[in-house]
Each structure stands twice: as structure tokens, then as C-alpha cells.
Amino acid sequence: MTKRFAIVAITKHGTAIARRLQAKWTEVDVYYPQKFAQGDEANVAIQTFSEPVMQLLPTLFAQYEGIISIISLGAMVRMIAPLLKDKKSDPAVVVIDDRATYAISVLSGHLGGANELTRTVAKMLDALPVITTASDVSETIAVDLLGRVHGWKIDLWENVTKVSAAVVNEEPVLFVQESGERDWWTYEKPLPKHIRVLSKAEQILEHPFHAALIVTHRLLSQQLMDIISTSAVLYRPKVLVVGIGCNRNTSEQEIEQVILATLHERGLAWQSVRNLATIDKKADEPGLLAVCEKYHWPLVTYSAQELNTVELPHPSDTVFRYVGAYGVSEPAARLSAQASDWIVEKVKSGNVTVSVSLITHEMQEDERMNFTAST
């Protein structure tokens, strides 16, 4: 059984509901008691069980992204209680009643995706989705999910609960966005008036607030970090492209050290690196590939001809003699980021040369209108 979600039923009617869902949905494995077997289970990849369902749940909990249970809510809560760890690792849990009237989001509504799973299941069964997460009900910012679809990473995770409470309780909240995708507000209404949108983190000093959400690729000053340390969540959007050149057989450690040191010295967060970029002759460079694997950074490569399409302020005849391009790190960074400039033009250290460009995202007019009420 290898699908993303498991459906588990324990009654005759629940078995029928499980089969209805499986007929419409390829991403589910189905489990129900052997006594309700209809003889075709092996052909349709349904697993039957004879033991109490309580013995089956720990295995499902560990193997699947989400569990859709056609079991009473109270019984399901009691059975999964000993299995709970934390919101970052627990699977989504959805409960459906025995007549498929309701689909209820029970566990991991946000990070685990139970709220979205509930909507999906409810639509397939023509059931009523029941979601109690405050930010979903209020149609406001879901602090723990913001930017997740774009790969934003959260810093100051310990403040998520406090900031979420400020958002849903309509306390003064600052939303600072210095970089990253602009389509994070998905509702067809203006941003709530208690959320003020700013474009620079330093503007926080000018406005009173109970909580702040800050989207930036920058390392903030110690003064700002002291102010927000207990009342803000930082998001790191994937907006930095690191162009890199290196001598053959440069070690992983040296490449990593130069990249991280360059970013830190220029006040840039390594968590915001989207990818590395270089010349195609370095596509098999062991040290470079090892760094990419360690940080989960894709490696994008360009031919010398492509690199030479970028005008450089300091072209190198020496580099051209070796690789056929007048530069590697600088043009690779700009090409990959589709940028017109660099935020770090070129830093050479030992066997490694690093350049950094910023990926920019423009706000569309309909998005701009939705922010009017709060800016």
C-alpha cells in the first residue's frame, strides 16, 4: 500500500463510503474489516484486517500523509491520542460520519493539510466540511502556512502560536515584505484593517504592534532582532541565486565556507538561497554537487555562449582562456535569477568565486487593490 492517504472504516456503511471514495480518487489506500469483504479486494487494492482497528492505526499513522477515518469522532480521538507527537510531524486526520453527512478536520489542519483534505473529501461525497481552525474560519492569514506553497521557510518558529493569536484576535499586526512572491493573500476581500503592510523591516520602529510577520532574505540588525524576538515570525523566501565558479576538485568544505561566509558578510540569509548556478563544465564537480545535496539546492548550468550574453563590468580574459566565458559566477547568477544586476557582484576567495543576484516579484494590480485597506 503506497498511496498518500489511507481510508479506514469499521462499519458496513463505512465500508461502502470508503469504496465510493476510492472509485473517485487514485491517491488513497483503503482498509476495512475482513467481515465486510466483497471478494474483489485483491483486484482493487483494498486491504482487509481482522485485528481491532486500534492495532492498525499506529502503522497507518507512521506511513501516510493523512488518514481519513469513517469512525465516530470521539472514538478516533481516543485511539490516536497516544500516537500524537507534534504539529510538524503528525499526519492529517479527517473523520467522516457513517452516513457521509459531515467531513471533519480533526488533526494537523494547517501543516498536515487536514483542512484542505477535509474540503477535498467533502466535495467528493457531497458532505459538509467542518473546519474549526480560526484563521480558516475568519479568512485571514494562516501564520504557519504562509508562503508554504512557494517554499518559504520559517524562522522564530517558537513565536507562531503567539503571532497566530494576534492575527485571529484582530490585534495590531505588522506584515513586512521585502522580497518573495506577492500572491500570498488568497481571499477575495481586502486584507483585514488590523494588519498593516510595510515594505522595510526598519519601519517596524515607527509603528506600535502586538505581532509581526516579516518576509525577507536579509539578516536583520541586532536592534531589530531584540525588538521582534518574542513577537514576530520571520519567513525566508527562496529569492537568492548564488552564481559560483571554482577550480577543478575544490573541496566541498571550501565551497560551502565561501558561500556561507559571503552571504553572512553581506547580510543575506542562507535559507533564502533558491539555487546555485555555474557553467556547464562544472555540472559534475564533486564538491559543488555535495554542497547542493547538503542544502537541497538545485544546480543550474549554462554554456559559455549563454554566459557571454551577459555584459560584465569586469570581464576576465584569464577565465575566457580556461572555459570560453568572460565570467562564470556573475553571469550565471544573473541568468538564473533573471536579474539585471547583482547584490553581490563578485567575491573571490581561494579556489572559489561567488556572485549573488536577487529574484524579484512584482505585485499584480488585483493584489495591490486587496492591500489598499491596510497600507
Image (cartoon, rainbow, N blue to C red):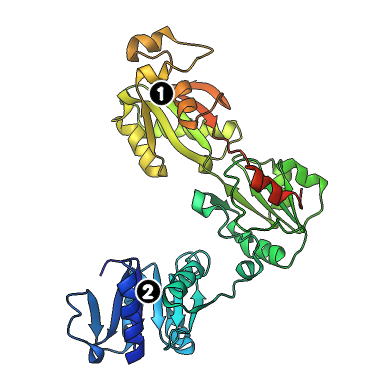
Q: Tell me the element at label 2.
A: helix
Q: Viewed as shown, does residue 359 lie left or right of 30?
A: right
Q: Residue at x 49, y 74 (%)?
A: 107
In the image, 348 versus 114, the foreground residue is 114
Q: Residue at x 44, y 17 (%)?
A: 309
Residue 66, disc: none
Which numbered mark, 1 or 2, is in the foreground of this view?
2
Q: How many numbered marks are there?
A: 2
Identified by mark 1, the residue type is Gly
Q: Viewed as shown, does residue 308 lie left or right of 186?
A: left
Identified by mark 2, the residue type is Phe
Q: Tell me the element at label 1.
A: strand
State the CA–CA distance, disc 1 to disc 2.
45 Å
- Where residue 331 sits in the image (x, y, percent)? 46, 21
In the image, 326 versus 139, the foreground residue is 139
- Where residue 330 sits in the image (x, y, percent)? 48, 22
Q: Residue at x 48, y 72 (%)?
A: 118
In the image, 361 versus 50, the foreground residue is 361
The residue that disc 1 covers is 245
Count neighbours of disc 2 (C-alpha within 10 A) and say few if under 14, some if 14 to 19, many if 20 or more.
Answer: some
Q: Residue furthest front?
A: 126
- Where residue 134 sits in the image (x, y, percent)? 64, 71
- Where residue 69 sits in the image (x, y, percent)? 40, 81
Q: Quadrant of residue 244?
A: top left
Say if 77 sits above or below 139 in the image. below
In the image, 332 versus 269, the foreground residue is 332
Say if 156 sits above or below 368 in the image. below
Mark 1 vs 2, N-terminal side: 2
Q: Viewed as shown, does residue 147 lie left or right of 296?
A: right
- Confirm whether residue 156 shows in the render: yes
The residue that disc 2 covers is 61
Q: Residue at x 73, y 68 (%)?
A: 169
